[in-house]
Every structure is written in structure tokens, then in C-alpha cells.
Image (cartoon, rainbow, N blue to C red):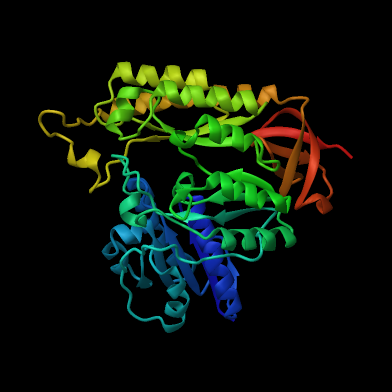
Amino acid sequence: MEKVALITLGCKTNQYESQALGELLQKEGYEVAYKLCKADIYVLNTCAVTNEAERKSRQFVGKLRKLNPKCKIFVCGCASQNNPEQFKALAGVQYVIGNANRLSLLEKITARKGGKVQKLPDAYEDLHITKPKNSRTYIKIQDGCNRFCSYCLIPHLRGRSRSRSILDIMQEVDTLAKAGAKEIVLTGIDISDYRIDDQPALLELLKQIDVFGVRIRLGSIEPNMLTEDFIVGLSQIHNICPHFHISMQSGCTETLKRMNRHYTAEYFLERVKMLRTLFKNCAITTDMIVGFPSETDTEFKATLATIKKAKFAEMHIFPYSRRGGTTADKLLGVKNNGFDLVDPQVVKARMKTAMDIAEKMKIQYLRAQRGNVLQAVLEEQNGKYITGTTENYVKVYIPNACKTLLNTLQKVKIGKRFQDGVLAEVIE
């Protein structure tokens, strides 16, 4: 039996798509792994959100060949959609596609011929999973993006926004819940734009899947969708996790305008305040770009003031990465209303400042949880600890716990800080 290892870089959407491909390969008789290990065949699902992510995607080909010099490598994802030639020239690569028609990858692995990047689809491509890898699992509900933020290449690599049918999603939730999933994470490129009959329908989807009794967590959501009606409606979803990852990107209104983000820093903070009013002890997490073109010291200080007010439980902070084809890149150096790159040393210093603040906020959030009784999905054995995630996104470490607790939902009492989370004990 040939062994296939699926290596996934980047976002939760990629992880879901890799698992769906893995299930198809298992049905065809392949042994399937989802980690870096020796295998006969590798499927490399790439990322291109930054230049660094794309570089790492290329480097992985060499890593795979070191594990097995005779391996056959099949490449898909955003980096190969952006530039397929960078992979075709690498030794061991048999076939390269992008993000379109991933279902065809199975027959390509069997045939091992040719390879080309196809035109991105207009309709949602049907991919699904039937067995959760662990007790927290992803469900993809949407693909593509219509926002065209000035720094982002993803709409060009994933195509326009398209939504999965609500019936398909409900069937998959039902299947995964019956198979033992305790939590589902709704994922996609822009789940805020989930639609039914071309009308915004994320709240309606949540109402429909709430009946299955499995815990629901939203992936990244856009600030624009957090209207008062939406937040109130969200608070009425019984199984929703009080954890909201809101894509801020910048805490300065002027920077947000150049990013083509259609909200202000003040609006963002108002939404955070409303969420905290209706969801007690909720986690607010975010993404942030440092050193966006023409970002001044004054603008960066405004962003720091915003993040301090928001009191994020966790932040993903990235330096600006030039991506050819984006509006921001086209405007670099253009006279009159063009953008200027920020000095790399200034970006480095700002990154450190922002990350130090983010770490302090995370510590404050975790300390505030001490003594609380929360519900944790226990997912993995990590040495002498079993680790899990609470509804409000606290990573817990249960010492000397019985393995029978794995893949269960348990009440836990939160203790002191430990590693990247907290110690906790299961309440019988």
C-alpha cells in the first residue's frame, strides 16, 4: 500500500481541504498521514498570503525529498495558483494545480501525468469530510473573496466569493456530530460573506446548525458585519463559542483607508464593547499588519492605543509583505497619493513593540481566568498533560489525566498560567 502524506501550510481553509482530499485518498486504498513523515507520495497544499509563506512553500519540496529522494510530489494551493512555474522546475514535483478543481487531484495522483493551473471556478467546489480527525474539527462554508483589500492577493488566487449550500453544511455537521465531534469551527476565506440566494445569511446558517447540539466556533470575521442586529442575533445562538476573531489589520483610521478597509478604529472598538456586553468573559482575538506603506509614527501610535483599548486575548501580528498585483504594490512610489515603503528597521522595531503589548494582554487575559469553571474540549496527549480548548479560547493543560478523557467535553477549573495557556483540573 502506497503512503500519502498531506502537508498543509497556511489557513484553516487549507487544513479542511487537505483533510477532504485525504478521505478521498483513503477510499482509493492509500495509507494517509497529515504530518511531515516519510511517504511515497506527498500532497503539498501551499500558502501565498506573504512572500515568506510562498518561500516556505517552495522550501518544503526540498524537505520532502530529503525524507524520501524517490518520492512523488503534487502541489496545490495559493502559492501554486500565483506562480506554478516556481514548483514545476523543482525535482520530484509531478503535478501542479492551483485552487481550482481540487477534486481532480485524486485522479492526477493515480495517473501522474502533466499538470496545469485551471481557471478559478464561479461556483462553490464540493469538498466534504465525514470523520473528524479530533474532537474539534473544521467545516468549510465559503470560498473566495470580494473585498480586495489593497495589501491582499488572495482574491486573485481564490476567486470571487461563493457559498456552500446550507443543506450540504447541515448534513456535514450532522455527520460529524454523530461521529463524535464536540466542536466545529466554521471556516472559509471570508465567512462574513456567507450567502443564501445571494443574501447575507451567516446568522441564518448558525440558527440552522445550532440544533445539532455541537459547539460552534466562528473563524475570522469582518468588523463590517458586526451590526447591532447581528451581535444580538449571535447572542441567541445557544451553542456559539464566546470567542470572536475579528480582522482588525490596523487600529488607525487613516491606515485603514489606504488598506481599503471600510470601517474606522472607533467603529471597531464600539463592536468590541458590544460583544463584551452580551458575551461575558468572551475572547476577542485579531490580525494586525505592521509597517503598511506610508504608516507614520503617529499612525502606529494610534494603532497601539486602539489595541490597548481592545484588550485582545491574542493577536497575530505580521510585517507588511509586498505582493505583486495588489493595489498597494502598484501605488508604491507613485507621485501624488502614492505609497512609500516603511524602513525595514522601523518595521522591526514596531513589530517588537506591538508583540510585547500583545503578550502582556494575553497574560492579563489568562490571569483573569484563574478560578473560573469552563467547558473544555480535550484534544491531545502532550507528554504527561492532556491539552484542550475552552469555549473562550483558553488552552488548558490537564496534568496526569486519564486518556479516556481524550475527545470529550469536560468542565474544568482554571489554575495558574502554564506554557502558552493555563493549568486546569477536571471537575468530576
Looking at this view, is 413 or 93 the one in front? 413
Q: Which part of the image, by quadrant, shows the C terminus? A: top right
Q: Position of residue 199 (x, y in %)?
A: 45, 49
Residue found at x 35% / y 44% = 147
Q: Which part of the image, by quadrant, shows the N terminus? A: bottom right
Q: Position of residue 203 (x, y in %)?
A: 56, 44
Residue 178 horizontal side relative to residue 252, left or right: right
Q: Is residue 182 visible?
A: no
Q: Position of residue 306 (x, y in %)?
A: 45, 20
Place residue 288 in its image quadrant.
top left
In the depicted structure, whether residue 39 falls above or below residue 412: below
Q: Is residue 189 visible?
A: yes
Residue found at x 56% / y 24% = 274
Residue found at x 68% / y 48% = 210
Place residue 323 in its image quadrant.
top left
Looking at this view, is 122 or 355 the one in front? 122
